[in-house]
Image (tube, grey):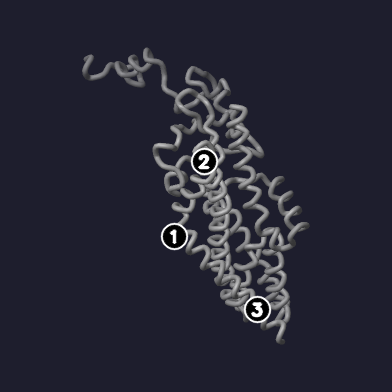
Amino acid sequence: MFPLITNTASQLFVIFLGLVLAYWLACDYPRMHHEVCTIIGQEKETSYRFMVAILSRSVGGYMRGMVVTSICGGILAFIGFTIIGHPYAALMAIFTGIMHLVPVVGPWVSAAIATVLGFMFSPMLALWTLVVTMVAQNVTDNVISPKVMQSSVQVHPIMSLTALVIGSALMGPIGMVIAIPLCAALKGIFVYYFENETGRQLVAYEGAVFKGTPYRDAEGNPVAAYDALGDDTFIYESELIGNETAPEAKAMPKPELDNSWIKLSGLQPDATGFFKNPFAKDDDSNTDDDTKTGIDGSMDDSDS
């Protein structure tokens, strides 16, 4: 018991130190950045600030989104466990929310443990427990998570799975937790330096790995900072870069969806036959004639 108590106390102390460190960083980070910029010089100051903004946006946004989605997943699980009468509804809901922070493996582990505990009471309770965990996880991942994660940099599934494998091999469970935000940060840094060095815009609406909103300046050149960040508001909100230093950019308009049904000749305004569009307007000549005569060919009151 003594090693267990000492290890637990050590972990709690580390968590406490981390919270204290985060507090002081949040209080003094603008002045700390100014001091770092003084050390590295004015030539590299802008690049440094943009790189810090990319890291903050990727890592911070992802972690905040994970915490929010974990809380939502735990609440949904608690509601479902309470409805089906699970004896450890609150405990399993907390465990489900915590394990949601572990990508891929965490939700399966929490679902398995909750199902096993339910099976100890009755097989039917175990079945309903499995259903509740699946529904809660799907709602969290497919409905809540996309809305919450809009503030973080998108990572392609190939990149996220590769990052999870590498993180798990190097650092185990902790590596799996930090793999995706670190991958998002590296992706943003790569986009920033690639577009600055080559002048070619890598981010595009129709892209795969580098899919996103492309930004261009008044001359039509890509703006690497906004392409790497994913939007043009984080720089101002984070106070990492002044308004006078931030570049002028505008998001490119999204391409219109290619609707093949509109191209059918039968749906065009001048089409005739069975497939004529009933909501299409007639020509001006036909419209004028219709205003002068009724459907049966009789004259209007004004003409008469």
Q: Locate the N terminus and report the quarter of the image it occupies.
A: bottom right
User: Which residue is rendered at x = 34% and y = 18% of the image?
Assistant: 290
Rounded to the nearest whole Å, what is the CA distance between mark 3 and mark 2? 44 Å
Secondary element under disc 2, as helix, strand or loop, is loop
Eyeballing the image, is 154 above or below 78?
above
Question: Horizontally, is 121 left or right of 151 in the view?
Answer: right
Question: Horizontally, is 11 left or right of 161 in the view?
Answer: left
Residue type at numbered disc 2: Gly
Say which of marks 1 and 2 sits in front. 2
Mark 3 and mark 2 lie on one chain; the one further toward the N terminus is 3
Residue type at numbered disc 1: Cys
**Residue 143 appears in the figure:** no
Q: Position of residue 123 (x, y in %)?
A: 73, 77
Q: Position of residue 205 (x, y in %)?
A: 58, 34
Q: Locate the C terminus and report the quarter of the image it occupies.
A: top left
Q: Which residue is mark 2?
A: 41
Say which of marks 3 and 2 sits in front. 2
Q: Identify the mark at residue 27; answer none if there is no mark.
A: 1
Asked whether 79 or 97 is in front, the reply is 97
Secondary element under disc 3, as helix, strand or loop, is helix
Confirm or deny contact between disc 3 and disc 2 (CB under 8 A).
Answer: no
Rounded to the nearest whole Å, what is the CA distance between mark 1 and mark 2? 24 Å
Q: Which residue is mark 3?
A: 8
Q: Position of residue 245 (x, y in %)?
A: 43, 37
Secondary element under disc 1, as helix, strand or loop, is helix
**Residue 154 appears in the figure:** yes
Mark 1 and mark 3 lie on one chain; the one further toward the N terminus is 3
Mark 1 and mark 2 lie on one chain; the one further toward the N terminus is 1
